Amino acid sequence: MLSHQASDPKRKSLHGHWSSRMAFILAVTGSAVGLGNIWKFPYIAGQNGGGAFVLVYLICVVVIGMPVMMSEILIGRRGRRNPVATMALLGQEEGGSTRWRWVGGMGVVAGILILSYYSVIAGWTLAYVVKSATGVFAGASAAAVSEQFNGFTGDWRLVALCHTLFMSLSVFVVARGVERGLEQAVRFMVPALLILMLVLLGYSINSGYFDEGVAFMFTPDFDRLTWGSVLAALGQAFFTLSIGMGAIMAYGAYLPEETSITGASAAVVTADTSIAILAGLAIFPLVFANDLNPADGPGLVFDTLPLAFGQMAGGTFFSTIFFILLSFAAWTSAIGLMEPAVAWIVERFNKTRAQATIATGFLIWFVGMGSVLSFNVLSDVRFLAGTIFDNVDYLTSNIMLPLGGLLIVIFAGWVMCRNSTADELHGSGGLFKTWRILARFVAPIGILIVLINAVR
Ligand code: TRP
């Protein structure tokens, strides 16, 4: 095996290194915690019937998400380049084929597609900061809150404006390479978000419908579980952990040699999963207390949380802070979604970071207009999975990310030398053996079974 070329510890990333283990954990947590936890998890769980979906999601996070995340980081650190170049280089060194670069290539495309609609929803969040601050929700009824949502998303110009604003913010940060500043924001954002979720949880507990909410989330009704919802749970696990598209690989490329990949992954997975579960626990009781439909779709959070804030003492304040924090969470995820594309363009075409980011940002903005219009002008244009937005979401979360993850664990578990991976994971003890079994057998077989059954 050629692996010993790869173990050259002197290999350096072109983009510098994280200043500390903490900086890396903050960056990965910042990318993981986002709209996926607070906006997407509750509505996907609602659409897929709750309990059984949540259980499958949690299993996917542990037995598939965790090994995929570790594989991505270790591949990234070993290659120390953008995901395309890293996969080409390690593919050559470890498996004799540069064709593995297509895994990186698919990740670049997935990042662009995900951010195209992610930015639209982040734009809604920005608009809700303003709505909250101006007291629109104070004392509002469920009908009034949902009217706000429909009125807003129905106005494509307003939605396009917010999408444009959010993309500009993301491009600004990535172009100037000042992500580090935003990572520092994660230090207070994640704890603050946790605290606000607890405030909401307190409100939910007192709503009188807490038991219904908990039962909905945690009583598995396997009769309602289809292969389609199992795939949705798998896709959500990938989406929320930011894995399967090379973003974490790109971040791993800047990771110092001595940092424990297992420890960092466990920290991120724990933080991310807790926030999603808390969001569900805050939202579902409100759904039932207000006679709303848990299968309502992408508007669920925007229809429930403002309602709760509107009835709380100090609600205008809390609501404003909440949507500001959520916008920040989306912002730190957006920069991660752009990273594979930007790093690739910089290295491959010798462009400056600013040029690469502006070009990528413009493309994403343009593609995103399809999702802007999915909620108004083009809401009747439906094919395959639904609207344009539904299709981009389905294609990325349910197909591209699981497929990317499958190839990544196969690469780390089967193509890479045992020594190379043991080297990156610091040892060959029980933890390493567990990772290897998950990465070689459990994760790939699990992903394949779900994909095959759901798609055929
Ligand atoms: N994990 C993010 C969220 O839950 C979304 C996301 C998916 C992401 N893939 C990513 C973020 C890659 C950064 C990088 O909101």
Image (cartoon, helix red, strand yellow):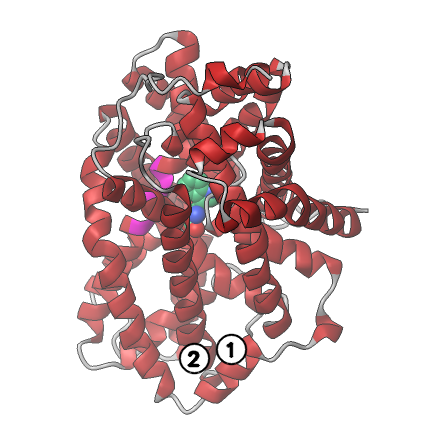
Specify the quadrant that holds the N terminus. top right
Quarter residue 24 falls in: top left
Image point 63% across, 27% down: which residue? 415
Please tell me which residue is depicted at 53% across the width and 22% down the height of the picture: 87
Which residue is farthest bottom? Answer: 208
Evaluate whether residue 166 shows in this view. Answer: yes
For label 1, the crowd category at 10 Å Cα-Cα, with few meaning under 14, some 14 to 19 and many 20 or more, is: some
From what the image shows, is residue 205 above or below residue 353? below
User: Is disc 2 in contact with disc 1, using a CB cutoff of under 8 Å?
Assistant: yes
The residue type indicated by label 2 comes to: Leu
Say which residue label 1 marks.
Answer: 292
Q: Which of marks 1 and 2 precedes in the sequence? A: 2
Magenta stretch prevailing secondary structure: helix
List the residue tagged with mark 2: 286
The amino acid on which the numbered mark 1 sits, given as a three-letter code, is Leu
Secondary structure category for the residue under label 1: loop
Q: Secondary structure at mark 2?
A: helix
| Residue 257 position (above or below residue 345) | below
Along the viewing direction, whichever of 290 and 4 lies nearer the viewer: 4
- Boundaries of the magenta span: 329-335
On screen, residue 420 versus residue 438, left or right, reads left
